[in-house]
Image: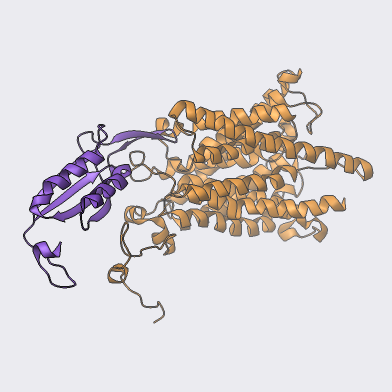
Chain colours: A purple, B orange
Amino acid sequence: MKLVTAVIKPHKWEDVREALETFGVAGMTVSEVSGYGRQKGHTEVYRGAEYDIALVPKIRIEIVVDDADSEDVVGIIVKTAQTGRIGDGKVWVSPVETVVRVRTGEQDASAL
Amino acid sequence: MDGYYAFMLIATAFVLMMTVPALALFYGGMSRSKSVLNMMMMSYVAAAIVGILYVAVGWSMGFGGDGTLFANPLELLWLDGVTTDSYIYVMFQMTFAIITAALISGAVADRLKFSAWVVFVPLWSLIVYFPMAHMVFSCTDDSLICGRIGAQDYAGGTAVHINAGVAALVLVVLLGKRIGWPKDQMRPHNLTLTMLGAGLLWMGWYGFNVGSIVFAGEEGDAFSARFMSETGRTFSTTTLAAMAAILGWLLVERLLHGKATSLGAASGIVAGLVAITPAAGAVNLSGAVAIGAIAGAVCAWAVSLKYKLGYDDSLDVVGVHLVGGIIGTVLIGVFSTSSGAGGVDGLLYGGGLGSLGDQTLGVLVAVAYSGILTTVIALGIKYTMGLRLDEEDEVNGIDLAEHGETAYDLHSGTSGGGTGILAASTSTSTQGVNA
């Protein structure tokens, strides 16, 4: 199994969720996060003062999937979240050793 | 006369509303979420302290007789010798003393010890405001600004706004800047409160300006005619100036920084009302629009001066009240018409430079008097009990440090978002204090 983690632009979240559901992803964990990448935030003017905004709001999606599905899931996220402008985010995949469903105690593939 | 008296009852309540709750909301919304209660408390406690002090000696120092700077404080001590049918005029002036002190609080957000504020407010009222009210509002022949210089000030451009603005500047210079200022962004935490406060201030300002009508012996029909024509003028000039200032502020903001903000609209209202305060009786409708628009535009630029000059005037008391007060008071010398309350033509109406000179001198006296004596008071407090909150308390939040409360107890104990489910595990104690 793989853990797919994606950090995307907030306004793309609905599109990504829809595409993942259509594909058949069973569940996910989503959080509102902030961070920065290569562009290192931006400056903003408010009430006569210029501020460096170091952290930009993002949505983080975490999905545990079968090994076979991980490439497709990554592809769907990249395709739907892409705007082509800076700050589109990142997707990364990491190996997962074990998954247990708390309600039944089922393990691994049957727990997904 | 009965109608006028009934009107004064309402006007007085309106001006009190300007401090509690309007100014408290206006400032409270602009402060950070960890300091909103302290910010509001500074207005509420100023009302309590100054109100009682005003009845004790304030009225006597202001209106108890002759004097260049102030009248005999003991003449009408605790309203001795004032009949109850005149009490409403005392109460009306009292509400002016209250809001003037409360206005200063916006400059010192997040970092002034509450105890220092509680000591500063009565000293400042006694030494700075009560004399200034005498110099401007009593208008005895020997009173400095009104009687001797002859500067026009209908409702307190000098005594209230310039006075509070200068005091705010002095206090923030002696108090120092907040930890993290100006690098950290210290944006308003709740602009809906600020919009509400600005709206209530606008409403209350009708008590402030329109209620400032003064009669000189008129009776019967002459009294009624004067009452109706002058209140019609001041109500209208007050309204138009606020409207023009919103537009002036938003236009400058849009041009300089790209966006018209709600904070700009709220501040524009106040800037316009501040500027029309001294001029409400003196100018006609177009003069009111001009003064409002100029005040809105100039103050929108003036609030960024603190970044260039390095003083942390947190909620822009200097940029709005000092700058707006000076604009309104000086521009009387330009836009005043002889059909107005002062009976003087300004520069634009062929009156020459005379009025402009008087108005400027009035401003300078107000700035000097408030500046020097506020410095003495603030230095006295700084080197005895201290002005500044502990560094740790300032970072953790003055609400919790000084009042033991927080304004928004949504998830007590946990930081940031979440369900608040961990609150019970992280709060230090849930036992009653008396247990």
Is A38 or B218 nearer to us in this picture?
A: A38
Q: Position of residue B174 (x, y in %)?
A: 43, 43
Q: Quadrant of the C terminus of chain B?
A: bottom left
Q: Is residue B86 left or right of residue B15?
A: right
Is B287 or B336 nearer to us in this picture?
A: B287
Query: A78 above or below B248?
Result: below
Residue at image position (60%, 60%) is B48
Q: Is residue B191 left or right of residue B226?
A: left
Q: Residue furthest bottom?
A: B435
Q: Position of residue B258 (x, y in %)?
A: 44, 29
Q: Is residue B334 visible?
A: yes
| Residue B54 in which image quadrant | bottom right
Q: Position of residue B247 (x, y in %)?
A: 58, 31
Residue at image position (31%, 68%) is B421
* Label tally: 0
Query: B128 above or below A2?
Result: above
Is A110 or B9 nearer to us in this picture?
A: A110
Q: Residue furthest right?
A: B220
Is B343 or A43 nearer to us in this picture?
A: A43
Q: Position of residue B68 (x, y in %)?
A: 70, 39
Q: Is residue B147 left or right of residue B53?
A: right
| Residue B425 in which image quadrant | bottom left
Q: Is residue B71 visible?
A: no
Residue at image position (23%, 33%) is A39
